[in-house]
Amino acid sequence: MDSQALRESLNRLASNHRWTYSKSCRALLDSLPGAAPGRHPVQVVGGLAQYQLDELLGDDLVIDRVRQETQVLDTVLDSVEGDPRIAYCSPEFGLADAIAQYAGGLGILAGDHLKTASDLHIPLAGVGLFYRYGVFRQRLQSDHQTETYETADPTEYGAIDTGVTVEVPFPGREVKVKVWRLDVGRVPLILLDTNVEANSKHDRDITDRLYIGFTDHRVEQEMILGVGGARALAALGWPIEVHHLNEGHAGFITLELIDRALDGDDLEAAVESVREGLVFTTHTPVPAGIDRFEHGLITPYLQVWAERWGIPVENLLALGHDAEHPGKFNMAALCLRTAGAANGVSELHGEVSRQLFAGVGRGDDIGHVTNGVHARTWTADHVQELFDDVLGETWADGDPDAWERVGNITLERLEVSRQISSRILAGLVEETTGHELDPEALVVGFARRFAPYKRATLFMRDRERLSRLLASDERPVHFIFAGKAHPSDELGKSLVSEVLSFSRSEEANGRLTFIPDYSIRIAHAMVQGCDVWLNNPIRPREASGTSGEKAVLNGGLNCSILDGWWAEMFDGQNGWEIAASDAEEPETRDDEEAASVLGTLEAVIEEYHAARFVFNGRIRHAWQMLGPRVTAARMLREYAERYYQPILERP
């Protein structure tokens, strides 16, 4: 192997995002000169100087590792059977910190969906947008969140120019869309980009940033994702039979699918044809979370299609009719009226969704597939080694038989594992904030988007009781918070400010730390190192939540209101329930639930310090009972069995 061959091999490994969940491949790429957190390995490989390549060539161990990882990648790619038949459409995909194309949980879930589809050999492709400015960076100034954006270049992510450009019809013009491809193991992810020279300045900026208001910008982004996505898949020649919409943002894909199915002006027959291959997953348990566009805004975009088909535009507006907001076009309603199947993302969310969307298309028949997480991505390397040794490697696939062997993990090995995780978290906390964690303290984590319904400050309502809890040196506890508010969410930003202000108060006693600029890297350290994962949303507004599932895999215990995934998986011994209030008045409800949070935490702290054997027993019980259920492998198998296979196997 010469230096050119070495660079080519390393670039192949860096360009396929299998490294995001393969600890051996990631370790190899992380060992290269110039590697750093948040820097994509494609950039690292591209920056290697000749003398650095020569040094690597002189290290037989490195060359052996490169050859081994290349052989594994070849084996993975050689096992791909044909082109994708399922398209998974999402406005964001969270694969790694180095790929700033996600905003939060929806994107992380989508990234895990792709990784798991690769693991399970499901013939699936992802469809998303390429955002030139990606996810915002959180900056804290005088206890207030501000935002900055960094320019992203798809080639620095290892994206391949497919050579395909499609056009999407807009009022009075056609917008050109470039198609990039990222590979995630066996699964391709195509990203649509309007930053094309032939477009106007306005149109080049359509895919500049993620989630920008309910303006023409948002409508145009969703048109590009839906219509552009369907056209890109067709241009690539992929025989897509299932279109799976991860939320309603890609709902305009139905326009292109109807266009293909339309015979004359029979819209109803065309919609019926589209239903046969359309699956819709809703993540929204409250009306306020649904994309709605004013008729005056959306009508010109729909008029393009109405004129093309020779039908009144009112017929298209009816597909998104919202009885409670008659002057608005409801994207969830559009999806429910055109999908053949729909699901929520937890058992409780399925129930809530059937009530929320009763009488709207498939609304009465909404099922559920509870979200899961990609085990190899989110489980710490040393915990993976423990599981591989004791449970066998199929634990990551959600194999119940493997998880039944949890009893063979000794409490001594469990303790060692938790200590390693704690040290990793302590190192990150010191690096990012300068704070030192007391190794004897119970560490409670809260990390998620600072949306008001998630109530980051709920536990602070009784400051006197909280300060007593934080003052104890005999039974120390340390809270670690992280999270961002949406740039336009002033109430969410005020919650960030409140936590920051309290963290510096005498009442906090130096035992509450806020880690800025929440990211996948920070999430890894927190779900791996926190002893207890706190979750106290307003029930039932948490559709699923997955951060607590990640904590479970690493030996963290959940302390949560019975909402989302926890409502169906809590068994009384695998964590703690925060009792929900029956009060209808919000202030009374919050007071009562804040008291429940602190009361539950007091009991948790007591058990941790006075009965560690019992606490550790809970961890083993949680692993055994929850391990096979919280994996994305279980989730993908359910999607395949309930939704994908019935379509793919249809005569």
Image (cartoon, helix red, strand yellow):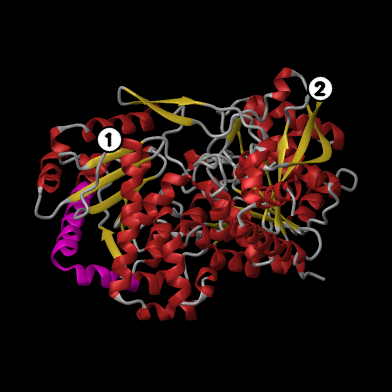
Position above or below: 390 against 508: below
Amino acid at pointer 2: Gly
Which quarter of the figure has residue 158? top right
Q: Which residues are magenta?
A: 593-621
Which residue is drawn at the image coordinates 71% and 28% (left, top)?
299
Which residue is drawn at the image coordinates 85% and 50% (left, top)?
261
Prevailing secondary structure of the magenta residues: helix
Classify residue 204 as left or right of residue 208.
right
Instruction: Report x, y in % for residue 359.
Output: 58, 52
Tag 1 or tag 2, which sits nearer the N-term? Answer: 2
Residue 516 visible in the shown view? yes
> Residue 608: within the magenta?
yes
Instruction: Report x, y in % for residue 305.
Output: 80, 34
Q: For the image shown, how many numbered marks are present on the structure?
A: 2
Which residue is drawn at the image coordinates 64% and 70% (left, top)?
641
- Disc 2 crowd rating (10 Å Cα; few below 14, some 14-19, many 20+) is few
> Residue 337: within the magenta?
no
Residue under label 2: 172
Classify residue 286 as left or right of residue 199.
left
Amino acid at pointer 1: Val
Instruction: Report x, y in % for residue 162.
Output: 81, 42
Secondary structure of the residue carrying numbered label 1: helix
Position above or below: 638 against 21: below
Secondary structure of the residue carrying numbered label 2: loop
Position above or below: 17 against 46: below
Check the image and name the residue furthest to the front.
58
Residue under label 1: 499
Check the image and name the residue furthest to the right.
264
